[in-house]
Amino acid sequence: MVKYGLDYTRCRWILPLLLGIGVIFGIIALAGRGWLESQTLPYVHQASLWESCRRGSQGGEWSCESLMGYAWGRAAAATYLVGFILLVICFALAIIAFAIDTLRFNFIRGIGGLLFVAAVFSIMGLVIYPVKFSTEIEMTGINMFSWAYGFGWTTAIMEICLGFFFCCLPNYEDQILGNVKPTYFYSSP
């Protein structure tokens, strides 16, 4: 990206595109019912960020209990949701920043800082959930934290990595804008 500059049409939108993918992963994590699932037969337990569902070992209907009745459930949902909202704000700001012909590099560094704050909130929710869930909700059999919980962690890791990219990008302002003469390491005799 630095070699060709941000005006290079395919490279200009890579960071906002990655933020958009992070938003999609965050939506999957928020809406997914696979935060915790039974790993072995009988499949009697399934949970999301919002509720915990059980059914009898012989099958039958799922009976769900809201996790919003627990203080830790509200805390986990609120902190992850705040991190997700900050990610959406960063996505919108990145689109605005990269749509302007003259990039404002301090603006881009601010997006990176906001991404780090979003990552902190997301990680807080992702840590509160399994610690308190496994101690306060009775689980039978072998259970595993599943695909939707994995999407939540993927979102948090993307927030951290993209925060570094957005914070470090202004260090290469001259190279990106083409103000630096290329340096060649080979000189002819």
Image (tube, rainbow, N blue to C red):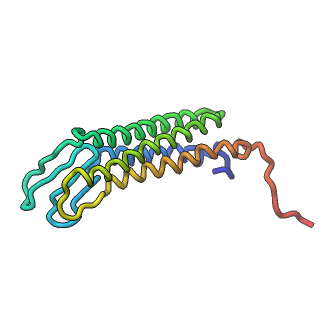
Of residues 44 and 189, the one drawn nearer to the viewer in this rendering: 44
Name the spot of residue 164 as percent of width and height, x first.
58, 48
Instruction: Please name the residue shown 89% across and 65% down the image.
Output: 188
Q: Taking 87 as reference, is 68 left or right?
A: left
Q: Which of the 4 image quarters holds residue 45?
A: bottom left
Residue 34 in sight from this viewpoint: no
Q: Is residue 20 above or below residue 107?
A: below
Of residues 34 and 24, the one drawn nearer to the viewer in this rendering: 34
Instruction: Please name the residue shown 41% across and 36% down the image.
Output: 85
Q: Taking 24 as reference, is 38 left or right?
A: left
Of residues 2 and 167, the one drawn nearer to the viewer in this rendering: 167
Residue 87 in sight from this viewpoint: yes
Instruction: Please name the residue shown 21% across and 54% down the image.
Output: 46
Question: Which residue, as the protein is rendered here, is positioned at the far front?
Answer: 135
Name the spot of residue 48 as percent of width and height, x first.
26, 48
Q: Quadrant of the C terminus?
A: bottom right
Q: Is residue 92 above or below residue 124?
A: above
Task: Give the total number of marks visible in the rendering.
Answer: 0
Q: Taking 93 as reference, is 62 left or right?
A: left
Instruction: Please name the residue shown 28% across and 60% down the image.
Output: 144
Q: Which of the 4 image quarters holds residue 65?
A: top left
Name the spot of residue 5 as percent of width and height, x first.
67, 46
Q: Is residue 162 above or below residue 41?
A: above
Name the spot of residue 102 as percent of width and height, x first.
66, 33
